[in-house]
Amino acid sequence: MSARVLARTDITIRRGRDSARALSPPMAGSADMELDNRSGDYWIENAASPLFGKILPGRQVRIRMGMMEREFGEGEFGEGEFGDWESEEGNGIYNVFKGFLDEPPQDSSIEAQSTGLPCLGTLSWLRGKKISTPLYENIRVDQALAVILDLVGAPVDTTIGLWDVGLWDVALWGSGGWPSEARVLNVAATTLLYWWLDDVDAFDAAVQLLNTEGPWAAIYEDDEGRIVFEGRHYRLLTERCTTPQATFRAGVAGDTEPLYRSLKYMPRLRDVINVCEITVNQREEQALGVVWSLGATITLGSNESRSYRAKASDPFKDAVTPVPGVDYMVTSGSLSTVSLDRNSGQSCTITLIAGAGGAVVTGLQLRAKPLTITGTYVVTNSIDTTASQAKYGQRKYPHDIWPEISYLTAQDLANGIVGIYQEPKAAVNLLLQSATYERLVQQLERQISDRVRIIDPMMAMDAEFFIEAVAHNAKGVGLLETNFTCEKAVDFSIGVWDVGLWDVAVWGF
């Protein structure tokens, strides 16, 4: 399809955090372009089109960019210089976006004859999907995220669209379940004592888990559309986060480092956090008892099946499939089956199937072991932030954290947040243009969470930053603008312990 992408409008791609701050929520990525539709292939009403019935919201879209040897001169392009890339007629091919088609606008006017291709990133698949889970005990944040992805499901790669070889390639894909290769979940540092969901939006649940993992944790889409989770220790222990992967500078031609087109500096004085209060619930398992009752008579016809959602006020475990004479009474006819869809969580579904003669049922109830709150505590940072409060005023941590964590975990989390953010952490928007081979390589190879060095002599700045968001803007053929949104890196002396004296595990924070 690359030959049909219209150069009169830019191709725009964006993914990463909603803003530069590492505590900002993840953002569902987006992409947009305009396709030449003089062939009529993309008219939704065109039954003669090879894509008829297939241009639908939710179809997968992949966008790739190729670097051609002839654009850079003899000897500047070579195999092995690009990492994970595919070769097609001398081109190095990079993935730059993979997501889902949104609703495509169509314009049949003589001067347009085009179809828009607005796309959403893979994180958008979580929005609007209500999910419920069993109760989990002592589950890490990354394991809980895996549960969410398993319940939500997502498309797989089944090609149904057209394909072409060129600078920009776009392919439409089919739908199915969420494959393991479409996620990269690194080990989290936070363990949840109890965790469950009951009719909760999957995206909101993922954001809450991210907040509970703490500063420097990240959820984002990579350039292959995979959902990536990084725990709060990832940037402390991973080479691409501890060592600058590139140096960008303002300077004169001839400098060895890639030059940036412009830099916008944001001091972020208003984004200070010097008070962090975290509510922690203490729960205890209770004896088996009634956690829900219907309170109505049920009349079923012959072989009729009916389900009831039993929702308790507290999460529960070890629910008992209703027992006749104890959890319900059959006053007429018979039941052939009584079943539960799960035995823990905050709700479950009870299904009754009547016998051939129907049934009248009274007194239906559910027994389980509830986990009731026996204490609620507000944990406040113990790090002294009075100097910060005197300079910037009292500024509280604003995000929602899962309350079923240990007191010590909450204390470490509160201290970690204010320890990093009680002083401003500057952010920058760095704009690069593909005027040189070296610059284009950096535009396509740099990833979210990469550590980079930025030098600006005019601002007297020589500092290291983490990339938090990436935005590409292709202006016709041959010019790519890339904006890296970055937050200043702050280094801490954090102890590491293993079998030897100092090794590979973080303790504290």
Image: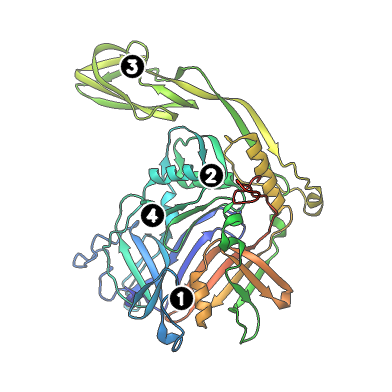
- Of marks 3 and 1, the one in the foreground: 1
Q: Secondary structure at mark 1?
A: loop
Q: How many angstroms separate mark 1 from mark 2 (CA)?
A: 38 Å
Callout 3 secondary element = loop
Q: Does label 4 or label 2 sit earlier along the sequence? A: 4
Q: CA distance from mark 2 to mark 3?
A: 41 Å
Look at mark 4 in the image and give the residue it sits on: 181
Q: Which residue occupies the foreground of this view, 328 or 71?
A: 71
Q: Earlier in the sequence, mark 3 or mark 1?
A: 1
Determine crowd level at label 3: few under 14, some 14-19, many 20+ residues with C-alpha closer than 10 A: some
What quarter of the picture does the N terminus occupy? Answer: bottom left
Q: CA distance from mark 4 to mark 2?
A: 21 Å
Residue placed under numbered mark 3 in the picture: 297
How far is mark 4 from mark 1, CA to CA?
A: 25 Å
Q: Nearer the viewer, mark 3 or mark 4?
A: 4
The residue carrying mark 1 is 81
Q: Do labels 3 and 1 touch, CB within 8 Å?
A: no
In the image, is 45 to the left or to the right of 415?
Answer: left
* Circles 3 and 4: CB atoms closer than 8 Å: no
- Quarter location, residue 250: bottom right
Q: Which residue is mark 2?
A: 209
